[in-house]
Image: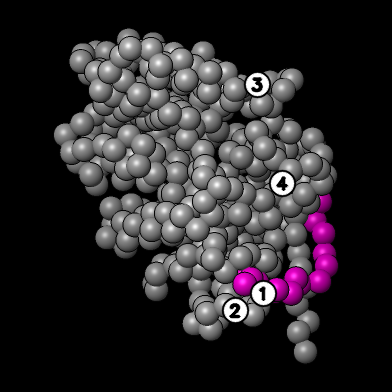
Amino acid sequence: MNTEELVEVVLPGTVEPEGLQIRHGAVPAAGPGQVVIRMEATGVSFAEQQMRRGRYFDQPPFPFVPGYDLVGTVQAMGGGVEPDLAGTRVAAMVKVGGWASHVLVDAADVVPVPGGVEAADAETLVVNGITAWQMLHRKARIRAGQTILVHGANGGVGSVLVQLAHAAGVNVIGTASARHHQAMRERGVTPIDYRTEDVAARVRELAPGGVDAVFDHVGGRGIVDSWSVLAPGGTLVSYGSASTRDDEGSKQWPVLKILGRVWTWNVLPNRRRAYFYNVWAGRALARNRFRARMRADLTQVFAALQRGDVTAQIAAQLPLTRVADALRLAESGTVSGKIVLNP
């Protein structure tokens, strides 16, 4: 007899981290084409920081269970699922729902985790790894010998970006607060303190001809500087609006402003390109193609981890029931890498 119960974290509204609720219930049953994953590791991403403020662009209505991605073992399967999945460790990107002991997922959306890779290590590379890989190789299409600028080079996505870039033979300039600079130098990144330095002026000193790509999760007025430091033929990849996390008003407006700038820059006669990257782009219209691309790219990231090109950047590990502490720590801006939640 199965005595397990579901434990999940509920975000009831725009609350402080202590307002998150722990809810108990029955473990979900797998329907046709579905699997139940017994969570071994999930994480705190910037998306959850925005969601608790009601600031994430397309978050569901309150209340809901946050959790952008997870790694765990397939515990139960519905009809039509390949039997080989039973008992295997898999990763899944779900946008919401990952902060739970058991998560119901379409079998087509899971990616096997290679043998020997720990759950927490793999967790740091699911949404962060897919995002970094696709921006580098599908959007900017970087090449060996090029130079790029990574904003937030110490963060979850940023730390993966710089490692994948180095593996591809690319020079990296990165922004972060001064406390992170020594660790960045050890990874071969030329650091810039965005708090005390004129970032655009410093980038022009380091790369007088401009950089070949900029990866900007900050948004706001600074995105104009990101565009200005591009070399001819360079690419700006915007993938967020972190600077507006604590703003009031419409959560859509900051993203719409970025989209407007991107459209304007691309229609003007110039030799540079701009993109607003959304990891979910194309899912609604071409789900099978989206799934194939996600599986291929995460497989590449896991292979990079096994080769040692990428190391898992774990800032801390906490139990799911201490999610408030985990979220507080993530929002403090004092850590490098990802905060992982375990059952």
Q: Earlier in the sequence, mark 2 or mark 3?
A: 2
Q: Earlier in the sequence, mark 1 or mark 2?
A: 1
Q: Earlier in the sequence, mark 4 or mark 1?
A: 1
Question: What residue is disc 4 on?
Answer: 324
For the point 28% across and 18% down, the residue is 271
Distance between the Cα atoms at labels 1 and 2?
Answer: 6 Å
Label pair 1/2, CB-CB below 8 angstroms: yes
Q: Quadrant of residue 9?
A: bottom right
Judge by depth and name the residue closer to the eye, 180 or 242. Answer: 242
Q: Residues within 10 Å of mark 2 (few under 14, many from 20)?
A: few
**Relative height, residue 18 to residue 150 (above, below):** below
Q: Residues within 10 Å of mark 4 (few under 14, many from 20)?
A: some
Number of on-image labels = 4
Circle 2: element type: loop
The magenta span reads 21-37
**Relative height, residue 259 to residue 121 (above, below):** above
Question: What residue is disc 3 on?
Answer: 253
Q: Which mark is residue 80?
A: 2
Q: Is residue 125 visible?
A: no
Q: Which mark is residue 61?
A: none
Residue 85 rendering spot, x and y as whole percentages: 52, 78
Q: Earlier in the sequence, mark 3 or mark 4?
A: 3
Residue 205 left/right relative to 332: left
* The C terminus: image quadrant: bottom right
Question: What residue is disc 1 on?
Answer: 32
Distance between the Cα atoms at labels 4 and 1?
Answer: 35 Å
Q: Nearer the viewer, mark 2 or mark 4?
A: 2
